[in-house]
Image: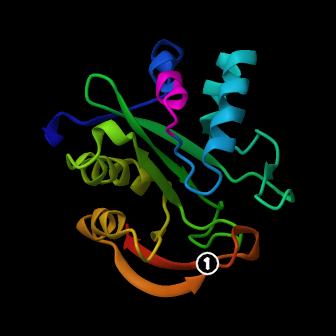
Amino acid sequence: MKSMVTLIKPSLDRLPEYVAALEQGWSHDNVNGIETTKKELEKIKNDPAAFIKLLDDREAKGGPITLPDGSTRPRLPSFHRWVWDGEFCGSMKFRWQPGTSELPPHALGHIGYGIVPWKQNRGYATRALHLFLKEVKQSGLAYIEITADPDNIISQKVITSNGGVLIERFKNHPVYGEKEGLRFRITL
């Protein structure tokens, strides 16, 4: 079944399925969750085309980002892909800092991903990350980093199945509550 998984560029014609997932309580954001969902639904309602455009912001023109503590930081270049098996399954996001593989301290990793609950435990995240890494390799970075919570064994397996190597246990940036995390590196 996982071989049916593909990645697609977000588009207006497929936006209704993304909205349906948000309306069912799913969020790609494991830090701000429902708050991000509410903000995204509002942005989509106000200007769906602008929302889609922001999902492919390789020049970081979307304005500053707001962190959980309310502070702002410059937006990093980024792009999204939606995980698809004939319908919406989740999303993948890549962000980077031009000219270096390093990220600023407030950015936990280069790649973030999430699969909707009703499509989990099918190997979709592992397959989607594999496909996504092929596109990310074109960035010219030497490596990417992905973080996972110490108790999220499933996410750790997704990362290690795609060549991720644990490089450190760390405390998250204070804006994320300084909880413990695991940082994995994948050489590109």
Seen in the image, is 121 located left or right of residue 179? left
Q: List x then y, in percent, for residue 13.
A: 48, 12
- Against 105, residue 74 (above or below) is above
Residue found farthest to the top: 13
Q: Which residue is found at the position 30% from the left and 47% from the top?
A: 131
Q: Quadrant of residue 88?
A: top left
The answer to whether residue 139 is left or right of residue 105 is left
Q: Picture coordinates of residue 5 (x, y %)?
A: 24, 36
The span picked out in magenta is 19-26
Determine whether 139 is above or below 105 in the image: above
- In the image: residue 117, left or right of residue 112: left
Horizontal relation, residue 83 to residue 146: left or right: left
* Residue 58 shows in this picture: no
Who is closer to the viewer here, 152 or 109? 152
User: What residue is shown with label 1?
Assistant: 179
**In the image, residue 64 lies in the stretch drawn in magenta:** no
Q: Residue at x 36, y 42 (%)?
A: 117
The N terminus is located in which quarter? top left
Q: Quadrant of residue 166?
A: bottom left
